Amino acid sequence: MIGKLKGIIDEIAEDHCIIDVGGVGYVAYCPARTLAALDSEGTAVTLFIETYVREDMIRLYGFRTALEREWFRLLQNNVQGVGAKVALSVLSTLSASELANAIALKDAATVARAPGVGKKVAERIVTELKSKAPAYAGEATGTIGLKQELGEGAAPAPVADAVSALSNLGYSRDVAANAVAAAMKAAGEGADAGTLIRLGLKELAR
């Protein structure tokens, strides 16, 4: 099994790249976000690899981080109807932290932005992975607990009201929740909604 490739970018195509490792070219199918982040051909690269071996096919899937690879596995192993193609589409549209946030907030609409992911599949992703999202939140680890409370309707009233108010101003629930989380750090957990809204707007204005 191949778990990682470290070599030179030989080619970047629409859905894959070829990595030259010691004169052998490995084809790795990647999310669009991974391909877009690659440097030009001829430069060094390291990709985390998921190897698929079947009777009629051996295929490599490449990711910039081990966390993205874990999400690729989670999506396929835990959600009915999600295969490699759909998992790649989700990870092409959302980063690991954005996906974790969407799941925590039960925001199926954000997941459904991925091409080929319908409403029902998005809802299954949000439902089936809600208990796993915190462990794979990456950069969102600090606020994932608050977002889960919001998604479950269990957040304190001032917090929920502040997030709702910022959302009504046009900010996404994810962005609004991040701003309110920052406001809570500044004002303390006992702050009222008005204070959280005021401090949250200051945070958003930075």
Image: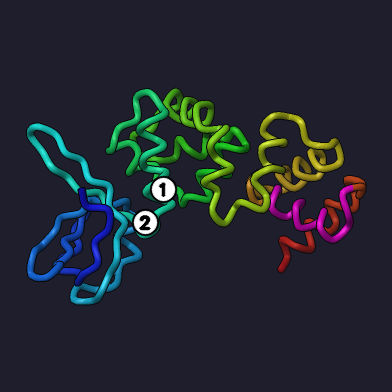
Determine whether the residue tagged by mark 2 lies in a helix, strand or loop.
helix
Q: 117 above or below 15? A: above
Q: Nearer the viewer, residue 80 or 131?
A: 131
**Residue 168: image tag:** none
Residue receiving disc 1:
93
Determine whether the residue tagged by mark 1 lies in a helix, strand or loop.
helix
Residue receiving disc 2:
33
Q: Nearer the viewer, residue 24 or 81?
A: 24
Query: What's drawn in magenta, residue-wise?
Result: 177-189
- Whole-percent x and y of residue 66? 39, 54
Q: Is residue 122 left or right of residue 203?
A: left
Q: Main secondary structure of the magenta part?
A: helix
Q: Nearer the viewer, residue 39 or 79?
A: 79
Name the image quarter holding residue 44: bottom left
Q: Quadrant of the C terminus?
A: bottom right
Q: Which colour assignment does the render follow?
A: rainbow
Q: CA distance from mark 1 to mark 2?
A: 7 Å
State the residue lying farthest toward the bottom.
43
> Which amino acid type corresponds to the residue marked 1 in the rendered image?
Thr
Q: 189 above or below 155? A: below
Q: Is residue 10 left or right of residue 190?
A: left
Name the image quarter holding residue 153: top right
> Which amino acid type corresponds to the residue marked 2 in the rendered image?
Arg
Determine if the magenta segment contains residue 160: no
- Mark 1 and 2 residues: CB-CB less than 8 Å, in contact? yes
Q: Nearer the viewer, residue 144 or 200?
A: 144
Q: Is residue 143 left or right of residue 62?
A: right
Q: Which residue is found at the position 27% from the left and 47% from the top?
A: 50
Circle 1 packing at 10 Å, graded few (<14), some (14-19), many (20+), is some
- Whole-percent x and y of residue 126? 52, 31
Name the image quarter holding residue 64: bottom left
